[in-house]
Amino acid sequence: MVREDGNLFGRVRTKGESTVAISFYYRFRFNGKLKDFSCSTWPADSLVSIRSARDAARDKAAAVINPAVEKKLARHEMQQEAAQKLAEIEAKRAQDLTVSDMFEEWVRDGVRRKDGNAMLLRMFKADVLPVVGAIAVKDLTEHDLRAALRKMVDRGVNRSAVMTYANLVQMFAWAHKRQPWRKLMIEGDPMELIEIDKIPPDYDMDNYRDRVLAPDEIRELRDLMVKMQEEYDAAPNKRVAPQPLEQATQRGIWIMLSTLCRVGEMSMARWEHVDLDAGEWFIPKANLKDNVANLTVYLSPFSLEQFKALRAATGHTEWCFPNRGAAGHLDVKSISKQLGDRQVMFKKAKDGGARVLKGRRNDNTLVLAGGANGTWTPHDLRRTGATMMQQLGISLDIIDRCQNHVLQGSKVRRHYIHHDYAEEKRSAWTALGKRLSEIAMKWIKLDRYLEISGDTMDAVQARRKKRQMVRWTRMQVCRWSPVGQPASGGTMD
């Protein structure tokens, strides 16, 4: 402790071996009690400034003013002033918040999609934020949002416009319940003023798609894939030759058609879940839409052939459809993109012209029936297979179970009744596979069959003797499927 005339005291503190600091305070009597007033610390402040602080405090005490209380009041006023300034800055910032700011907060705190919001991010970054992202929420009107949707319609992406509308409705409904967004939407939720059915012309708002591939289109698809593969195999310079569909994708097309699975479920399939000996494919509910329940697909001979051919191509990896490098499964949108890239006549760019994507295929090699029936997608294969089951007389209930749909009815019934309909589903898939085999078969001469299949005459004759083939004629022709089914002999139609 050190002391100086004028009631100035100092507490000495040491920091380490060579650092000394002295905290000075002025001691005075106020209302009959001793009080201490901090005058700062040496050497952070000089002794001159410390003595000046002591003198100022002494003068206030002489004027019956408590300098310590006055100091606290001054500090409190400064804090209030700083808080007020911060509030003004925050209020100004809130007034300037944009639609992009709202979207970022909504994606962070208000929405969780199964894909990690990946599709939502792509959709808004492509079509919404470039149009209205920079507009302050307080200045946004329904006309701005309607313009963004109409811009999509003008580009010909009506379905995407409807999906974007639904996402915008969800985002603004979320924001309208929370600050600071609620305060900024003075006129209310602008999406409530938009009637989406007035924007896309002649668009089915129920999004009912009924594309089903006819048997002739299935045969045409078979021939197109065979032709692409043969032309590539015969090309003298494969570096410049048009690439056919990947073998895995070709097999995937027939698997989707014959099992009614979704493209995402198939893309995530692991070989550990495929039992080729038992003819079963197990799909865990984590891979299924809405995580409904595990599904076991009983593979028909047709489907089994596709998986066996696929095993020869990708069996060295963990995944039935591996991505590049085989570190994971194929992206669930990859096959859809491959098919879409080969039907570009149905695709439009943002400016309304033909869509051309750099580094991607841009042709019409998979357009069926000359495009008369429109584009076809992986999900259309699922619908086609289900429709074929219906044509074969299979009950709608069994078809729904093969598709793993959530069945209508009482929750109590679903809770207590657990027959798995395994045999019924097995029969349905077998019947569908048989029908697809019949469609996919084509007549060729026997010597040509032996050439392209690698089969032998002895093997063919052995199957004939086991009645696996109908009677041969002198024309020596047989029905053969390029998608993996064995030959059967007979006369040409």
Image (tube, rainbow, N blue to C red):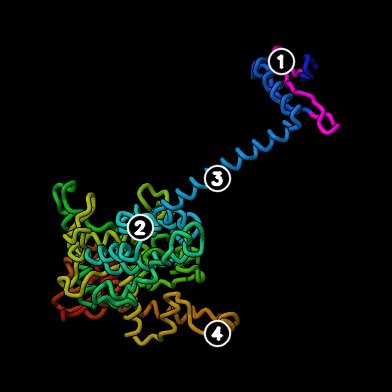
Dominant SS type (magenta): strand
Give residue 204's position: percent from left, percent from top.
29, 77
Nearer the camera: disc 1 or disc 3: 3
User: Label 2 belongs to which residue?
Assistant: 124
Nearer the camera: disc 3 or disc 2: 3
Nearer the camera: disc 4 or disc 3: 3
Quadrant containing the N terminus is: top right
Amino acid under disc 4: Ser
Question: Does the segment drawn in magenta span residue 208?
Answer: no
Q: Which residues are magenta?
A: 12-35
SS of the residue under disc 4:
loop
Q: How many C-alpha atoms fall within 10 Å of the one at disc 2: few (<14), some, or many (≥20)?
A: some
Nearer the camera: disc 1 or disc 4: 1
User: Label 3 belongs to which residue?
Assistant: 84
Q: Which mark is residue 388?
A: none
| Res. 478 visible in picture | no
Of the image marks 3 and 2, the number of the one nearer the N terminus: 3
Q: Is residue 210 above or below residue 140?
A: below
**In 3D space, how far apart are the residues under numbered discs 3 and 2 (Cα atoms)?**
36 Å
Q: Nearer the viewer, residue 76 or 142?
A: 76
Q: Which mark is residue 20?
A: 1
Of the image marks 1 and 4, the number of the one nearer the N terminus: 1
Q: Is residue 148 above or below residue 6?
A: below
**In 3D space, how far apart are the residues under numbered discs 1 and 2 (Cα atoms)?**
61 Å
Give residue 406's position: percent from left, percent from top.
47, 77
Q: Are marks 1 and 3 in contact (CB under 8 Å)?
A: no
Q: How many C-alpha atoms fall within 10 Å of the one at disc 3: few (<14), some, or many (≥20)?
A: few
User: Label 4 belongs to which residue?
Assistant: 410
